[in-house]
Image: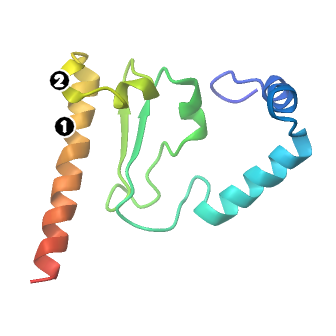
Amino acid sequence: RTASGLNLSDSFAMCKEAFGIDPEAVRANVRQTNLRYGARTPAGSRIQHVNGDVDPWSALGVLTSPDGNRTQPVFIACGASHHSWTHPADTIVQRSVVDAKRAVWGVVTKWVLEARQSTV
């Protein structure tokens, strides 16, 4: 089981039944993805890691910034799931999601302004 209660055996069985992918292939694909993207410590900058704490998938995400929030900030919206990020901003009334979206937008705006200034 993962920290969020996901049962890997059940997930492997689902992959096998639904897609014909055996557990060893899943493990190999996960290893390759983690190598390519850096797993929980991705290389790069200007990457935002956004999670909701009731989302079962959040335990598989980056929950602590690899660089102290300098160029890879982490935002966790209490009481939210990943579906909270897919709805238009004006339809969300949950305070934690509104605040997280505002913070995400603020970081993107800052990065765009920095990029503009560096090309001038």
Mark 1 belongs to which amino acid?
A: Arg
Please tell me which of labels 1 and 2 falls first in the chain.
2
Mark 2 belongs to which amino acid?
A: Asp
Query: Based on the displayed image, in which of its 4 quarters is residue 74 positioned?
Result: top left
Which disc, if any, is residue 102?
1
Residue ID at (35%, 51%):
73
Residue ID at (16%, 59%):
110
Residue 78 falls left or right of residue 20: left
Given residues 100 and 64, the one toward you in this image is 100
Residue 28 falls left or right of residue 38: right
Query: At numbered mark 1, what does the secondary structure look like: helix, strand or loop?
Result: helix
Residue 61 position (above or below residue 92): below
Q: Are there few (<14), some (14-19), or many (20+) residues within 10 Å of tag 2?
A: few
Q: Residue at label 2?
A: 90
Query: Based on the displayed image, in which of its 4 quarters is residue 15 positioned?
Result: top right
CA separation, marks 1 and 2?
12 Å
Residue 89 falls left or right of residue 24: left
Image coords of residue 86 (percent x, y): 37, 30
Q: Is residue 119 visible?
A: yes
Q: Is residue 77 visible?
A: no
Image coords of residue 78 (percent x, y): 37, 22
Image coords of residue 28 (percent x, y): 83, 54
Image coords of residue 88 (percent x, y): 25, 28
Query: At numbered mark 2, what does the secondary structure look like: helix, strand or loop?
Result: helix
Task: Say which quadrant the C terminus sits in.
Answer: bottom left
Label 1 vs label 2, nearer the camera: 2
* In contact (CB < 8 Å): disc 1 and disc 2: no
Residue 28 position (above or below residue 2): below
